[in-house]
Amino acid sequence: MGVTCHVVAAKRWSENEDRVKTDKRDARILCQRVESYHRGNHTVLNVLRVPTEEEERRRALGRQREAFKKELQSNAQRGRGQALLWAVRLKGQWWKGNLWESTQKQEPELLALLIPLREIILTIETQLKTLTRQLEEESIAENLRPKGLGALTWRMVQGEVCDFTRFNNRGQVASYTGLCPSESSSGGSRRLGSVNKHGNRLLRNYLVEATWRLIRWQPDWYAWKKWQAEYQQASGGRRKQIVVALARILAVDLWRIATKQTTLENLGLQPANPA
């Protein structure tokens, strides 16, 4: 029909914070910004990239796995909460092996609550194993994957990014991950804070998890060499800050590799599947 549709990030449209929000007011402000956007001011709207159907389906598989994980944890915690009513403290994977055998010695009323939860958890675990195996098989032979970045993690990263070529520069990559530092600057004063956590939360988690593994399995990674001395002297929170900084660099490096701007070898990374 010749109509261009923009999908934009949700936000509070009223700028004067008068605590008045109506559909009419939001529609008026949004129309004004759309007009300004088409006049060339592209800063007034955060236009989002809409995934293709294929990308959406590919991403959905990984997100379903995350939903199953969350549901498993929720039911496991629900069982622990029920047990506390009987002054019983369940630990770890209470629905498995020796832990479940000892749990079966508890009061029948408690077991009547735990057994249905256990059946749900075991069913979810079966589905998780199937999904995990399927996701790993899709990326196990990838030659762009560095050692330490598991087949599952690499597949999940690819699913969330959708298409690495969507980014024009490293700043866009870092911004999408939400691993950029927050900032409060004025005049000659510049103050950087914790990461802004904008962008894709799942991708951010995968990158941080992968970084913890890479600093163990990739001693020659150029970014790790840069931070290694400070990391080894640091402790606690400072180490976590360094890992977050490395995760941001890792995101940019994966983009550079995927877009053929560099290679694993040039970055000091060993491939997961050496030729």
Image (spheres, rainbow, N blue to C red):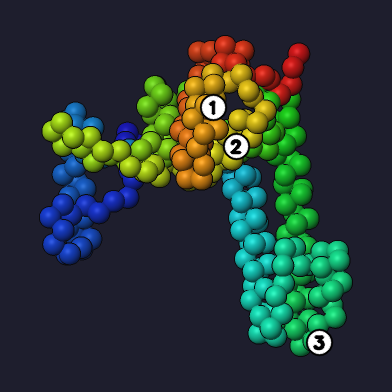
Badge 3 amino acid: Pro
Q: Amino acid at mark 1?
A: Gln
Residue marked by disc 2: 212
Residue at left 65%, top 55%? 69
Q: Disc 2 or disc 3, which is closer to the eye?
A: 2
Q: Which residue is mark 1?
A: 228
Left/right placement of residue 193 relative to residue 97 reads left
Q: Earlier in the sequence, mark 2 or mark 3?
A: 3
Where residue 140 sits, quadrant-wise, is top right
Nearer to us in this view, 68 or 186: 186
Element type at marker 1? helix
Label 3 neighbour load within 10 Å: few <14, some 14-19, many 20+:
few
Quadrant where the N terminus sits is top left
Would residue 28 be visible to someone looking at this image? no
Q: CA distance from mark 2 to mark 1?
A: 12 Å
Quadrant housing the C terminus: top right
- Where's residue 274, x and y in %? 74, 17
Per the model, the C-alpha gap separating discs 2 and 3 is: 44 Å
For disc 3, the marked residue is 108
Dot 1 alpha-carbon crowd within 10 angstroms: few under 14, some 14 to 19, many 20 or more: some
Q: Residue at x 51, y 45 (%)?
A: 236
Q: Position of residue 173 (x, y in %)?
A: 43, 29
Looking at the rendered structure, the secondary structure element under dot 3 is helix
Q: Residues within 10 Å of mark 2 (few under 14, many from 20)?
A: some
Q: Are marks 3 and 1 in contact (CB under 8 Å)?
A: no
Q: Position of residue 6 (x, y in %)?
A: 33, 39
Percent position (x, y) of residue 34?
21, 40
Sequence-wise, the earlier of marks 3 and 1 is: 3
What residue is rendered at 82% in x and 64% in y? 96
